[in-house]
Structures are given as structure tokens and as C-alpha cells.
Image (cartoon, coloured by chain):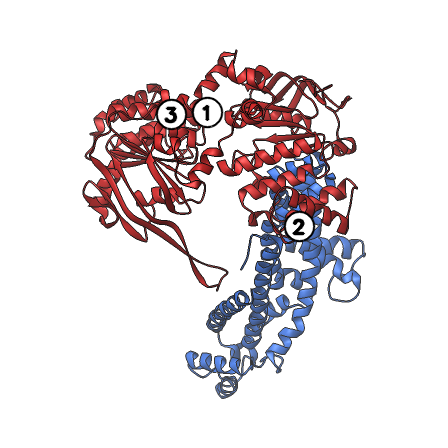
Amino acid sequence: MSRFTSPLLTVENLTVEFLSDDAPVRAVNAVSFEVSRGETLVILGESGSGKSVSTSTVMDLIDQPPGDIVSGRITFDGVAIGNLRGEPRRLINGRKIAMIFQDPLAYLNPVYTVGRQIIEIFECHGVASGKAAREQAISLLRRVGIPNPETRIDQYPHQFSGGQRQRVMIAMAIALKPDLLIADEPTTALDVSVQAQILDLLRDLQNETGMALILITHDLEVAASMADRVIVMNRGEIVEAGAAKDVFTAPSHAYTKKLISALPHGDAAENSNKRSTTSSEETVLKVEGLTKEYFFSSGMFGKRQSFLAVNDVNFEVKKGETLGIVGESGSGKSSVARMLLRLAEPTSGKAIFAGEDIFSMNQARLLAFRRKVQMVFQDPYGSMNPRMSVHTIISEPWAIHGDILPKAKWKDRVVELLELVGLKPEHADRYPHQFSGGQRQRIAIARALASEPELIVCDEAVSALDVSIQAQVIDLLADLRTRLGLSYIFITHDLPIVRHFADRIIVMKQGEIVEDGTTSAIFGNPSHPYTRSLLEATPVPKWVAAGA
Amino acid sequence: MLSYIGKRASHSVISVIGLLALVFFLTRLTGDPSSLFLPLDSTLEARQAFAKLHGFDQPIHWQFLDYLRDLINLDFGQSVRQNRSAMEIALEAFPQTLKLAFVAMALAFTLALVAGSIAATRPGGLFDRTVSLVSLTGASAPDFWIAIVGILVFAVSFDLLPTSGTGGISYWIMPIFVLALRPFGLLVQVVRGTMLGALSAPYIKTARAKGLHRKEIVFGHALRNSLLPVITVAGDLTAGLVNGAVIVESVFGWPGIGKLMIDAIIQRDFAVVQSTILVTATAIFILNICIDLLYAVLDPRIRY
């Protein structure tokens, strides 16, 4: 690509370690990359691969100690900036190089208005102040697509939605028209349709200003849709680098191949799908008119208001079938799951499980029911008691339901279950913190299986995991379904995953089902505009879009 | 907002009445005032006349009902010792305590914010360790001991400051220093702790990426976010001081409400004890409401 002349930023042989009680941990090892004006470089890698550390070093955002830059040379616009501190650094950060972060709620100061947080950039770099700065901030907010910027400028971050917060973050980053914008997982916390808008905004801004963009992501589709060039990182090292199309279509390194094969990609999913083959006509769960209304009052003595989180939801789950419930945050999908497990009480509606309405069960019946229906939660870190060993976690259902298994057999069964989910017998004596996220989710599945359930509700069960781990967990769930005849309700915001795995899908929006049908029908011929918009929001590779 | 204040105020009134009832009965457990007020050899008739005059001959629940009726009429009783309105005496002493408390607290608070913040920017550094040592000493040393040693050194040995009483600036120095030391010590620890958390918060990374001045990052962004727990502790400590720094006021002969209270208790001057409690309790309730409102000012996510 000839329009990229000499590189704007060059990072050579960067090695960063973090000091710990034992030996220092090497986060980044001999990493080199460069980016030119107008170019988008995507740094792709799973969590802990060192991608954020590499770019944070460019802006001197690594605290030393515990961080330690062992070696490396960082050149920006012909000047070495690796060792810049204090005033010279201040003239680069925010002005020449800007950064946006993954979680805009945490990365915006909660006690200041967004206006103040934008204006202070103009003021501290001596560009504008007072009324002029405010005017500029308003036009920036308008540019990034915040409606009514004149009034919203005086609001606080918590008064904005997730997508809007990220727009505010972008407004701050582009305030001084930087030459280089580093975006660290800018859309990871956002819904897929919002993600598409944010990525479009970044592309537009880049076209306008000709800035260089470094995009850090673990999301292969986002990477493909944005990248001119890609570097793939694994365990602190660059394992592959090259033009985006080459890397994605003909990966050379084994790790990249593994990553890309894990991508539940478009039509490929139709062929290699993990849908069930054994589903029968026997209905396991039938939900009728499920409704949840929340009441709240605005202010301490404000008027009582209500909000329909779930509105007249009806569906059935058949034995051996996976039902996918898809929707963006706030669509009510998690409320449905919580009610089905009686973790929250419905306002009205029925859920018939084995001929009995879940919502009218007494304590004893409920205990028996809970044995048959299990849940796997989103966060494998928060959903396990850190002080219980894996053995205690998995055997807990047997302690609660005394009739499942005599105590003498617990040990053997724990080992069986661990092997069933692909872990080792010796893992039984360890504690949750000694496992990776994917391993913990396996433990959670083993725990769910311990009570020999008929239905497992997975609420965003793989969302927190890296792609390659996601694929492993999905494979495991599919395999268990075949072997044990389980049914799943699989709740997610991630469309490619359900395409891979669900037999039928319901799409929820604002508490209501807007569309339901078989997976092929939903993906092949979506009838509701919302479903179409969700499908279209899935990013298209840049080289494909450019060719079209 | 106004409704919130109204609700808090009405809750406070209930609490104050409960407190007054408790104080009323507890003070009467300390014994019969006439045995303290009248000469040891006074006659039974004289004692009965004294009790009758002040209503001590009535059954205790009648005394209480009388007291409540008087309260509604804003009659807070007469001081047996000084023979004038007990509330007048309490209100005379209270400003002396308030002045002392607020100067001491303002000093402790300001110094703690600065010292704690700077200590948190370089944890484990020389400044941090020095501040930790000083604040721990300040928080743990008994104030009466510091006060007495202070008098011994600065008033008796070097004759730099007066031993006790009120007057010019020099009379303020030792009481304020002694009063401020403990709040300073505690607050520095709180500021340092919350600042350590705030300085590693994600929004500080944003501030650094924006190229803000270091001073603005530390004091503008981190400190502002650390204030809530600091205000909570500072409010508690201020309540302690407003309550009358009993010991410090006694040691330095400061005519504040703490000294008045302890004197009234020793003398079984019930009306004065009750009035001082009413004044300080009201002040503390007002202080607490102010602190709650301050939360909402400091953190826009808190709304009443």
C-alpha cells in the first residue's frame, strides 16, 4: 500500500517485565511493530497476550515499578519517546498520541461532567479556554454523534449509555486531532449494533484526519473489518504479522491458524455446526405469558413507576434441544433465565416443567426441581466460592440433595465429572483461583452436571472467555448434549456463537420476543427488522468491504 | 431534596427525644442532688423543702412528664447551682467549643488531605514513611497526656504559652494542636488509603493519556474521587469534637460545653446536663444531615 510513507510510530525490540515476589514476569518479549499515517494496525491476541502492555508503553502508562521496561526503542515522528517523562511527555500524550479504552464507565471520571473532562484537554494543552473551549467541546460531542450536545455536555458519565460513553471517550481522544489514536478493545463492552456504530465512527474520523490507528482487540471479526495490517500476539510475543487479508485467509503460524479456525465464521458454521441431531418431540419446558414488571420510584418520594423487563414471553424447549435466546443488554434475556430458576419471581405467567408450574412449587418441590435444572453463569470468577476446593464445589449438590449419591462414592464421581469436562483428577484438590477462565467454566459445567440435570441454563456462559476457549467450551456442551440427552437454554448477545450451537433461536428486544424460529431460518431469512439489524451489525472484513 | 431533609429532621427529633429520656433517667440514677447542694448537717425539713422546690419529691415518671411538658413550652429548666436558665448556660458555652472544634478540624482536615495525597503518590517513600509514623503516633497518643506534657514543656518550662484559660491567640495554640492531632492522624491514614486506590483507578490512566499536569491528576481527579470516605470519617471526628472535647477543655480550662457538662454531672445539676446534651445532640444531627448533603454535592451519582 503505497499511501503509507515512512512510519509514524516505530517500536523496536520492546521487552517489558512486571516485578513480582518471585521472578519477574515477562509480559512483552522483543516486540517490534510500526504504523504509518492513515494506516490501521490491529494487534490481535487473547487476554494476557501482552497487547495492551505494548501500547501502554508507547504512552508511558505503565507504572514503574512494578513495570520494568527491560529494553526497546520507541520512535514517534522521528523522535525517541521511550524515556520521555514530565513536561515533554505531556506535550505528546493527548496532543500527538491519544488513547481510548475498553470500559468507558471506568475510564471516565465519575464525579465530573463530560464537558469538564473534554474542556480540560483544551486547557491543559493551552489550545482554548473558557467559552471557546466549551464551544469546541460541544461541536466535538456533535461530531461523535451525541444528540443535544448543548445540554448533555453538563451531564455526568453515568447518565450516558455504554455506547454514548465510548463516543465521549472518542471525543476526548480526537479533541486535539492526534496523529496516532490507540484504541484498546474499544467495543468489547458494547452490544454488537453499538459496536458497528463505534467502528464506523473510528473509520470516518480516520478518513477525515488521516490519523494512524492502532486497534487492540481479541475479536477476530472486529479485527478483520478494521485492519490494513495485523500483528498477532501470544504470550507476549508476536507470532504473526502481515497484511490483514493474508493473515486471515492464509495464516502461517499454528497459533493464528488455531485462532482463526475457532472463529464460528459465516457459512462455514452451516457445514461444521454443533447443532443437535437427537432432539425429540418431548417437551421439557413450556413457558407461557412470562412477564416481569419492576416498580421503582424516582427520587425518595417520587412517583411510583413501572418498567416491563419481560413482557408476555412464550416458548418451549424440547428434550435434547438447544434454544438460543439472543438480545442486547437490557432486552430481558437474563431476567427470563433468573425467573426460570426462581432466582426472581415473575409478575405473571407460567413455566411448566415435567407437568408442574415452576412458579407455584412449594419449598420441597422447588428443591427437587432445582436438581433437574442447573445454571452456568457468565462470570466463572465470581460464581464460585474462592475458599472451596473443586471437590467441595462439585460435590455440593450431593450434600444438598441427599438421595443422589452416597458419600462413599463422591470422590470417584468428582473424578469422573472432571474427566467428562476435560480436566484432570488431581484438579479436585485445587481452588478456583488456580485455574484459567476456561478451566473454571469447565468446573462450573461439572458442578451443573453433578445433580444430573435435564436442562441447563447458560447465561452468557462463554462471553467472558477468549475465542479459542469459547470454541472448546461450546464443543464440550454439544458433546455432553449428545451423550447425556441434555437440553440447553443458551442466552447470549453473540450471534455467531448461537449460529454454531443452537437449534432454535428467539430474538428478544425490550422485554419482548420479536422473532423466533429455527437457526437456519433466522440466519437465512430474518423477518424482523431488528434481527436483520443484528445480523448486519456483524462486521464485514475490510478487504471484502473495499472490494464490494 | 427538601423532602429528604424533612424526613431526616423528623427522624432526628425522635432520636433526640429518646436520647433525652435516657439522659433524664440516667442522671437521676447518680443520686439525690440535695445531698450535694445542701450542707451536710442541714435538717430533713430543709432537704424536703429543697426537693419540693425543684420537684425532686415527685415520682420519677411525673418528673419526666413535667420535663416533657416544659420542653414543649421551650422551658429547659433552671440550673440548681447558678439559679438561672440551664439552656442559657449551655448556649453560652457552646460557641467556645464550636470555635475550637472547627479550627482544629479545619487544620487537621487540610493538612491530612495534603500530606495523605503526597504520601500516596510515592508509597513506601521517605515522605510516606514519615507521615505514617507521625500520624500513627498522633492517632494513638492519649490526648490528656499530650495536653499535660504540652503544658509542662511550653507553659511551665519555657514559659512560651499560657497554661490554661482564654484570651489572645496564644491561648488557642495548645488546645487546637492537641485537639487536631488525633483527627489528623486518623484522616491521613484514610486519605492515603483511598488515594492509593484512586490513583490506580482507570480514569487516572485516562487523565495521564490526556497529558494533564501531574498536580491536576493527583488533586483534581484522584483526590476528588477519594473524598467520600474521608468526609465520612471527618464527620465522625467532628461530631466527637462538637460533643465537647471534655478532657482537653478540662485540662486547658476552656469554658466550652464539654467542661460545662462534666462540671454539671459532678454537681448533679440535672437541668444543665440535659440542656448541654440537647444542644450537642441537635448540633450533631445537623452535622450529619450536612454530611449526607455533601455526599450528593461531591458525587453526582448520589441523589436523594
In the figure, is residue B24 to the left or right of A139? left
Q: Nearer the viewer, residue B84 or A329?
A: A329
Residues at marks 3 and 1, CA–CA distance in whole angstroms: 10 Å
Instruction: Identify the residue position indicated by label 3 in the image.
Output: A473
Disc 2 residue type?
Phe
Q: Are marks 3 and 1 on the same chain?
A: yes
Disc 3, disc 1: CB below 8 Å?
no
Residues at marks 2 and 1, common chain? Answer: no
Q: Is residue A287 left or right of residue A172?
A: left
In the image, which lettered chain appears red? A
User: Circle 1 is placed at which residue position?
Assistant: A467
- The reply to whether residue A204 is visible in this rendering is yes
Residue under the image location 65 percent in, 64 percent down: B250
Q: Secondary structure at mark 2?
A: helix
Q: Amino acid at mark 3?
A: Val
Q: CA distance from mark 2 to mark 1?
A: 52 Å
Is A236 situated above or below A160?
A: above
Q: Residues within 10 Å of mark 2 (few under 14, many from 20)?
A: many
Residue designated by label 2: B184
The chain carrying label 2 is B
The location of residue A10, given as percent across then percent down, is 70, 20
Above or below — where is A8 with respect to B52? above
- 2 vs 3, front mark: 3
Secondary structure of the residue carrying numbered label 3: helix
Quadrant of the image for the C terminus of chain A? Answer: top right
Q: Nearer the viewer, residue B219 or A30?
A: A30
How packed is label 1: few (under 14 Cα within 10 Å), some, or many (20 or more)? many
Q: Colour of chain B?
A: blue
